[in-house]
Amino acid sequence: MTLPVIDLRSDTVTLPTPEMRAAMADAAVGDDVFREDPAVNELQEVIADLLGKEAALFTPSGSMANQIALRTHCQQGDEFICESGCHVFNYEQGAFAQLSGLIPRTVDGKYGVLRLDQVQGLIRPDNEHLARTRLVTLENTHNRGGGKILPMESVKEVCGWAHENGLATHLDGARLFNAVVASKTAAKEWSQYFDTVSVCFSKGLGAPVGSALAGTKEMIAAAHRHRKMFGGGMRQAGIIAAGALFALRHQVDRLAEDHELARQIGSAVAEVPGLTLSPPPETNIVLFDLDMHLGTAAEFSARLEERGVLAMAFGPQQIRAVTHLNVSLAEGPRICDAIAACAEDAVSGRPASHVTSTYG
Ligand SMILES: *Cc1c(COP(=O)(O)O)cnc(C)c1O
């Protein structure tokens, strides 16, 4: 008997549960471009309230929510400060340049965390030779930082400094609810330091589609225009908003299980010579580096695949495994055994088959 494949490539692979599908089927809908979709309007109110903001806007994706935020805070030719490993800089095709004519100023953080002393001094003086520094954007939890929860103190300091100096602040909170559950700190506590916050419903929360951007009424009014321009004005979007509402109501607390499974996988990784956690998992992402003697990350992920576990090569020598709704805690031992066995295979020189992975 072949066991089912355990897919840890991303928390975006989660599937809607029968209960979520039922809620979606029952959603009251209307034309959201006319702002007449009851489910979308309800979702926007619920998420604005959770984040302690005046208003929110439903978007098709997290990338669009982030790009709308950048466009809302910045004008063509403006510069924004971000951490070098962040999603906005690395994984959105440089849309800030393509769509809005913006310049990134990247700063290397440790596991995605920026310290105040690293950003102080980066604001360019008012001088016609120079771009205007307008915005700081942070990411929490940090994907390339291995699901790191930003220390509240660093968020407070960096955002406080930004506001004192007239910069806007945006949070890419694609996985903010993982930070909320793991830190037992309300979403509002995290979002209070930011002018705008984006969140994803289609990651660990398990909804099929959708993200949101929250901020002041004025910012969200501007964001509405930008969403339409970027092609994100949707019509009877309540069908998908209902999935997001269901996720917010029923699938937030369970993220703790994903964190527990990630912790177990992390403990197994730490015991294998040649594998190093980068860093030990705090939420639902397990990121680890491979010593050269264990082969490349692409080979290692091919070995894992042979044993029924999918993970992503996240760099030449780095693997990412993400836990989520569709992988139960009961799968822990199988995942941990597969990782140990793949390392043994590599040491014994057994070749890996089908090395096809590309970096995430
Ligand atoms: C997934 C993700 C996004 C948004 O991704 P979409 O695929 O566009 O929804 C944004 N930021 C981070 C940190 C993410 O992990």
Image (cartoon, helix red, strand yellow):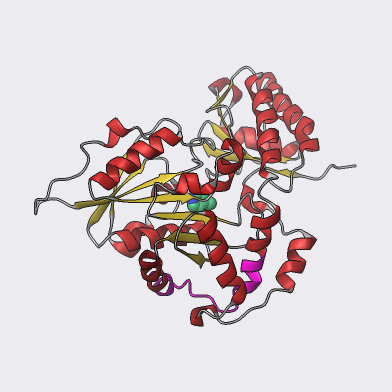
Residues rendered magenta in the picture:
226-242
Taking the magenta stretch, the answer to whether it contains residue 195 is no
**Residue 324 falls left or right of residue 136:** right
Residue, far right: 1
| Residue 259 position in % (x across, y down) | 65, 36
Q: Name the image quarter holding residue 248.
A: bottom right
User: Along the line of sight, which residue is nearer the eye, 298 or 213?
Assistant: 213
Q: Can the viewer see residue 113 in this picture? A: no
Q: Name the image quarter holding residue 216.
A: bottom left
> Image point 57% across, 20% down: which residue?
293
Q: Can the viewer see residue 127 in this picture? A: yes
| Residue 285 position in % (x across, y down) | 59, 38
User: Along the line of sight, which residue is nearer the eye, 136 or 91?
Assistant: 136
> Image point 69% across, 19% down: which residue?
348
**Residue 122 falls left or right of residue 88:** left
> Image point 39% across, 34% down: which residue?
154
Q: Is residue 279 above or below residue 305?
A: above
Quadrant where the image shows the N terminus = top right
Taking the magenta stretch, the answer to whether it contains residue 233 is yes
| Residue 333 position in % (x across, y down) | 78, 30
**Residue 341 falls left or right of residue 98:** right
